[in-house]
Image (spheres, grey):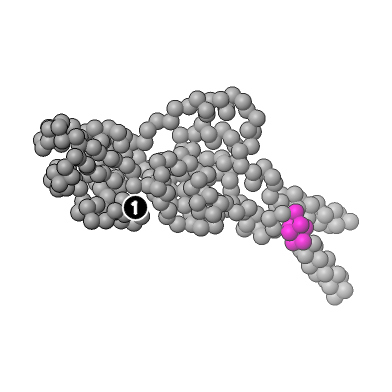
Amino acid sequence: MNFKLFLVFLLGSLFFTSCISRKQTVYFQNKKNAELESAFLNKQLPPYRVQINDVLSIRIKALDQKLVGMFNPIASEDNVNATSGQNLYFDGFLVDDHGDVNIPTLGKVNVLNLTVEEIKEKIKSQLLKEYFKKEANIFLTVKLSGVKYTILGEIKRPGTSILYQERVNIFEAIANSGDIPVLGDKKDVLILRPFPGGHKIHHLDLTDSKILESPFFYVQPNDMIYIKPLPQKSWGTGTNGLQTFTTIMSVFTALTTTILLFRTLN
């Protein structure tokens, strides 16, 4: 009798601990917090500051385009699509290990920890000082060549992606990679972010609406995102109650059969 009770207790415990609850799968819980919503709406997002290995799109224009042709990459003069897609890998300006970009004719310009607006003003000021007068009406466009990130672990489409927009939040990045399956841990997503002094690891709980307050809510270029599997994946007990019940019944049947055979043999 004691053995039977133990078996029932064991199977019951396995059933309740192996099921994946709603709290483990639903995004943005606790969203009734009015103060949190108000704080997010009023929050001013700081501009992104350029880091090493970022790729910039820099284009210089003027009334007489021939005057600025020597400052622009050759591809930008011949190809109207030079600033799109993988062409930016060859035609963009890589921020090197010293924080510099190497612009044709102008030479190296240090852009580390500057915003794109600050970079634009810095380059424009240098051009006016060394090459042009104000009458040339120089116009600059400086942009990040998309947000490149790598995502791996429990995600439908792991790999490196580039989204061509100014800002990308963690949910956009995940949606672009096919969303997190049921067996992915949404409560502890790891972000590995590069900084000038090294890398930092941060943990995000995607099920809690307080994620809106996190400085890691927005993905930055060269971020690495890792989604861990839930323990249920290694247990192999199923992703919902029906699958778990079926698995446990199979185990129970096998144990019962083994016990009956053992008793018969003895």
Give the residues drawn in magenta, as a range: 241-247
Q: Name above or below for residue 114 compared with residue 20.
A: above
Residue at the image position 67 percent from the left and 42 percent from the top: 23
Counting from the top left corner in percent of width and height, residue 145 is at: 34, 47
Q: Residue furthest left?
A: 130
Counting from the top left corner in percent of width and height, residue 177 is at: 50, 53
Residue at the image position 63 percent from the left and 28 percent from the top: 33
* Helix, strand or loop for the magenta stretch, by majority: helix
- On screen, residue 53 versus residue 242, left or right, reads left
Residue 140 position by quadrant: top left
Tell me, yes or no, whether the highlighted magenta stretch contains residue 160. Answer: no
Counting from the top left corner in percent of width and height, residue 28 is at: 61, 38
Quadrant the C terminus occupies: bottom right
Quadrant the N terminus occupies: bottom right
| 193 and 180: which is toward the camera | 180
Amino acid at pointer 1 = Ser
- On screen, residue 15 versus residue 212, left or right, reads right
**Is residue 202 visible in the rendered structure shown here?**
no
Q: Which residue is the site of mark 1?
A: 84
Q: Name above or below for residue 40 compared with residue 81.
A: above
- On screen, residue 98 versus residue 166, left or right, reads left
Residue at the image position 35 percent from the left and 40 percent from the top: 195
Check disc 1: other Cα within 10 Å, few if <14, some if 14-19, many if 20+. some
